[in-house]
């Protein structure tokens, strides 16, 4: 962070020594914004068009701002959620302005920026996009902002726990959402170490969200690699426009306590600052899936409740051993330890929390140029599901930004650093639940010894572990019972398991011995000995863009550079404890040309981007689109587009080196791997290449009969060099073992079950469609509905290959919302149904059951007290919905609270 401050200091000095206030030409404009009924509209936005000069109305609907009248008239734009936007010219200095905003029944007049990197009305956007406004954000009922977005069209949410959710569109969902870019004010919110967003950890607090734009489908032509299936852009409120103090306090079941604060102040006409922050704590959900782990992950697994034991999805330390000839009647059989539940390993520490603070300073260098410096600090306790289940404690991130932008250009730089607790091993930090369970089984049993050489039982001895004691006891009892009960294997297994559980047990939760061993393991970050995760990675990003207004078309030129420095002390990546981070980089440039024809009814656009990578070949991402508008007010809009996008494997997939017991997870950017499939066939995986998708899309958006909005789209995608996970038998150095056995032997001393990210040679094809409907009965009642369909067309994937499509075939939402009682009462009710689907991951694979949920929220504003009383509930029926196989079921969360809003 010191280097960041050194970079930001010169810019801060520039801000403070900027041009003098334009006292000579800056004259105040004052006015009032009202409804057609003459009621004031507090919080309406008032901007001088073409500048950054703006303000918002106070509780009486009044506003004051200063404008340069050198070249009158001055055009001001006035807007408010749910009302028509109005523009008017002010030609006289100190003129009093009265603006009347009629209620909007047009649900398609919103302005978005993310789709084409330039402001445009949503009807003219060439791709499928959804805009979530401030009022909709305020009505979300989930503790994590991202989880609440599942109610919107074609948006899939995968939740690992209460505060850790990820967003996907158009298939291939996961807890990391590696095919979707998530940004807050155009800063990537991913944590560099894990290549995921950890819910809204680095995002914008709810109180400061101006809007959310959800772009569906490939966007690499403008955003680079990994804008593969979509872009999610969170826009924050401008301190020059939205001043005042807002405080939100909530409490609810599961010990929920939630507080957020936003304070923004315009110190002068040029200088403004903003401080946002929040704290949330609640009792987290815990996973408890006792189904057997898939044989794609644990090839030697047994059915549930087998007397040989089995590896359960949500049990840790249920490690297995495959007996050889010395096992007697158990030769070739795999026996599993009982293992531990998530609740037993966490030892009652079920609290989840998130703390964040974000100071920001903005300065207007001119009316048209604004500079911003800000900093974010976050800290959290949560559970995340990736290659294992992880308990993150005292983890979080630092992010700093310096940006200068004009009305048609910007230069932006930011840095993100994550951490998973302090380096001091005596402090609480993050740990891997799988490692914790496994290393508990390899602790030494007091007074128990085993032969140094198993072939010489009478020779030297060494201390034995709990696992060795259990397996040895099991084998001894099994073989005795097998010989005396008529060689009945099932009866022998039942006898052996009961005896081993009683007389050679694993460490028992709640005992001093268990607590001492657990404490030692979770504080030890030594690879192969401890479960502690030590993440210290950095991502630096610099980008710039300029919009040219040419005589024949509009042209956008831009570029970006990004560098990663990955550090885990060997607990996740193939780095070491010497402090030398793994380094990776990528950079690219893009251009977009847009032309309007036929009285602006026809809009043509072409774009392209070239990206360079350290570990992959260069890539070119083109996009071509057409939008045609019909109707007297262009209220019917047809769109079609073609996109090609590329995806680089995540930093984790490129550099991981993680032994999870049943398999070794390895990066694949060097020379590839040779080995055998789980059925013994020869296997070869080349080094990773960029994944490519070609998508064709058509859509139609319209406003029908003034009160009905419709948006429908269909897409078809074809993936080349698709990146998935391949499980096979091999040596960790990439060489092929002598025989296709997954068990180490004299001939194959290093052989293991390996999991790598690999490209599949045949095409992977998907298709999908979505439909969104809105009907405005009036301000008191707005009805909405949406439906999405997603289909993985390709079925003939290679043996052992996991595509991670992880997407319901069908999903729909029905909702109603409105403002009643003179706009004092606001409410929202939403019903969501999601089809069942197969969920694949390196941690767990299985079927997620179909589920449904009802969310509801209401708020009543007491104007005199500047306070809104709030109440809401997510998953009203407490269905215990599982969204990510192997994770916790998400149950009901209800709250009541207060929102103080002082302008």
Image: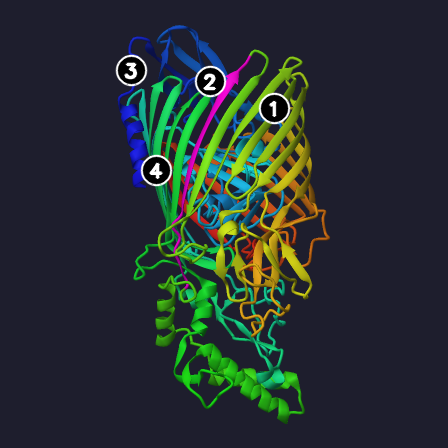
Residue matched to label 3: 21
Q: Earlier in the sequence, mark 4 or mark 3?
A: 3
Q: CA distance from mark 2 to mark 3?
A: 23 Å
Q: Are marks 4 and 2 in contact (CB under 8 Å)?
A: no
Give how far across and how far down residue 818 sits, in percent: 53, 34
- The residue segment tinted magenta is 531-550
437 or 833, nearer to the observer? 437
Instruction: Mark 4 or mark 1: name the one nearer the start of the chain.
Output: 1
Which label lies toward us, 4 or 2?
4
The reply to whether the C-beta atoms of the residues labelled 2 and 3 are less than 8 Å apart is: no
Query: Which picture quadrant has residue 622?
Result: top right
Mark 2 or mark 3, which is nearer to you? 3
From where the camera sits, is residue 689 visible?
yes
Element at label 3: loop
Q: Which labelled disc corresponds to residue 77?
A: 2
Q: CA distance from mark 4 to mark 3?
A: 27 Å
Where in the figure is residue 234, as x and y percent of width and height?
A: 47, 35
Residue beneath label 1, please? 124
Q: Earlier in the sequence, mark 4 or mark 2?
A: 2
């Amino acid at each position: 962070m010191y280097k960041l401050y050194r970079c930001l200091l010169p810019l801060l000095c520039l801000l403070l020594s900027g041009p003098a206030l334009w006292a000579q030409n800056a004259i105040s404009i004052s006015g009032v914004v009202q409804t057609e009924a003459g009621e004031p509209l507090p919080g309406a936005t008032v901007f001088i068009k073409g500048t950054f000069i703006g303000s918002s109305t106070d509780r009486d609907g009044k506003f004051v701002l200063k404008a340069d009248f050198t070249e009158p008239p001055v055009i001001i734009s006035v807007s408010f959620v749910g009302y028509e936007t109005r523009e008017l010219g002010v030609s006289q200095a100190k003129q009093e302005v009265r603006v009347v905003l009629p209620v909007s029944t047009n649900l398609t007049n919103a302005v978005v920026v993310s789709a084409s990197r330039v402001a445009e009305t949503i009807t003219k956007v060439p791709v499928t996009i959804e805009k979530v406004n401030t009022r909709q954000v305020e009505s979300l009922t989930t503790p994590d902002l991202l989880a609440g977005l599942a109610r919107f069209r074609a948006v899939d949410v995968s939740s690992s726990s209460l505060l850790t959710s990820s967003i996907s569109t158009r298939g291939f969902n996961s807890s990391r959402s590696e095919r979707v870019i998530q940004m807050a004010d155009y800063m990537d919110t991913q944590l560099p170490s894990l290549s995921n967003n950890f819910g809204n950890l680095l995002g914008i607090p709810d109180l400061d969200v101006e809007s959310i734009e959800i772009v569906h489908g490939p966007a690499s032509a403008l955003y680079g690699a990994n804008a593969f299936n979509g872009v999610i852009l969170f826009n924050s409120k401008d301190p020059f426009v939205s001043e005042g103090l807002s405080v939100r306090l909530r409490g609810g079941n599961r010990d929920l306590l939630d507080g957020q604060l936003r304070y923004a102040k315009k110190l002068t006409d040029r200088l403004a600052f903003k401080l946002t922050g929040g704290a949330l704590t609640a009792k987290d959900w815990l996973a408890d899936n006792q189904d057997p782990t898939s044989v794609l992950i644990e090839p030697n697994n047994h059915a549930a409740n087998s007397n040989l034991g089995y590896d359960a999805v949500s049990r840790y330390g249920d490690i297995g051993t495959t007996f050889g000839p010395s096992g007697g009647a158990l030769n070739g059989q795999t026996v599993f330890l009982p293992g531990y539940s998530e609740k037993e390993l966490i030892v009652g520490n079920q609290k989840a929390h998130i703390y964040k603070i974000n100071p920001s300073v903005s300065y207007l260098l001119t009316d048209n140029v604004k500079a911003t410096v800000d900093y974010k600090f976050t800290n959290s306790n949560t559970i995340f599901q990736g290659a294992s289940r992880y308990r993150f404690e005292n983890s979080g991130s630092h992010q700093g930004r310096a940006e200068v932008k004009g009305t048609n250009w910007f230069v932006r730089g930011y840095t993100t650093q994550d951490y998973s607790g302090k380096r001091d091993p005596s402090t609480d930090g993050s740990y891997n639940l799988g490692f914790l369970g496994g290393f508990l089984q390899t602790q030494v049993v007091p007074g128990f010894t085993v032969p140094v050489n198993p072939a010489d039982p009478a020779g030297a001895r060494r201390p034995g572990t709990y696992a060795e004691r259990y397996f040895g006891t099991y084998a001894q009892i099994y073989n005795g019972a097998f010989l005396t009960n008529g060689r009945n294997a099932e009866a022998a297994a039942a006898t052996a398991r009961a005896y081993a559980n009683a007389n050679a047990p694993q460490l028992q939760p709640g005992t001093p011995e268990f607590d001492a061993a657990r404490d030692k393991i979770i504080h030890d970050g030594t690879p192969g000995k401890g479960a502690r995760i030590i993440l210290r990675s950095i991502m630096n990003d610099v980008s710039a863009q300029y919009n040219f207004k040419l005589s024949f078309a509009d042209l956008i030129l831009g570029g970006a550079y990004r560098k990663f420095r990955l550090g885990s002390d060997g607990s996740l990546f193939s780095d070491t404890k010497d402090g030398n981070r793994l380094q990776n980089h990528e950079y690219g440039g893009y251009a977009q040309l847009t032309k309007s024809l036929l009285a602006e009814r026809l809009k043509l656009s072409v774009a392209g981007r070239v990206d360079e990578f350290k570990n992959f070949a260069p890539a070119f991402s083109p996009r071509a689109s057409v939008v045609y508008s019909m109707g007297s007010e262009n209220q019917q809009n047809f769109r079609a587009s073609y996109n090609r996008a590329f995806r680089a494997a995540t930093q984790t997939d490129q550099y991981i080196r993680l032994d999870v017991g049943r398999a070794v997870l390895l990066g694949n950017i060097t020379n590839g791997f040779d080995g055998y499939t789980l059925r013994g066939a020869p296997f070869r995986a080349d080094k990773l290449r960029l994944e490519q998708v070609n998508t064709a899309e058509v859509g139609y958006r319209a406003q029908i009969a003034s009160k009905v909005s419709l948006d429908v789209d269909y897409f078809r995608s074809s993936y080349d060099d698709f990146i998935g996970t391949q499980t096979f038998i091999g040596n960790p150095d990439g060489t092929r073992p002598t025989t296709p056995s997954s068990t180490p032997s004299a001939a194959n001393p290093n052989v293991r079950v390996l999991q790598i990210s690999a490209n599949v040679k045949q095409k992977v094809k998907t298709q999908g469609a979505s439909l969104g409907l809105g009907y405005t009965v009036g301000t008191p009642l707005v009805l909405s509905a949406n439906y999405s369909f997603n289909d993985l067309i390709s079925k003939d994937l290679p043996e052992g290959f996991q595509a991670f499509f992880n997407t319901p075939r069908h999903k729909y939402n029905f909702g109603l919302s409105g403002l009643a009682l003179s706009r004092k009462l606001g409410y929202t009710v939403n019903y969501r149904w999601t089809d069942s689907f197969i969920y694949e991951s390196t941690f767990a694979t299985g079927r997620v059951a179909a589920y449904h949920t009802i969310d509801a929220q209401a708020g009543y504003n007491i104007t005199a007290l500047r306070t809104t009383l709030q109440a809401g509930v997510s998953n009203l029926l407490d269905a215990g919905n599982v969204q990510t196989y192997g994770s916790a079921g998400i149950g009901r969360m209800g709250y009541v609270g207060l929102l103080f809003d002082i302008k």
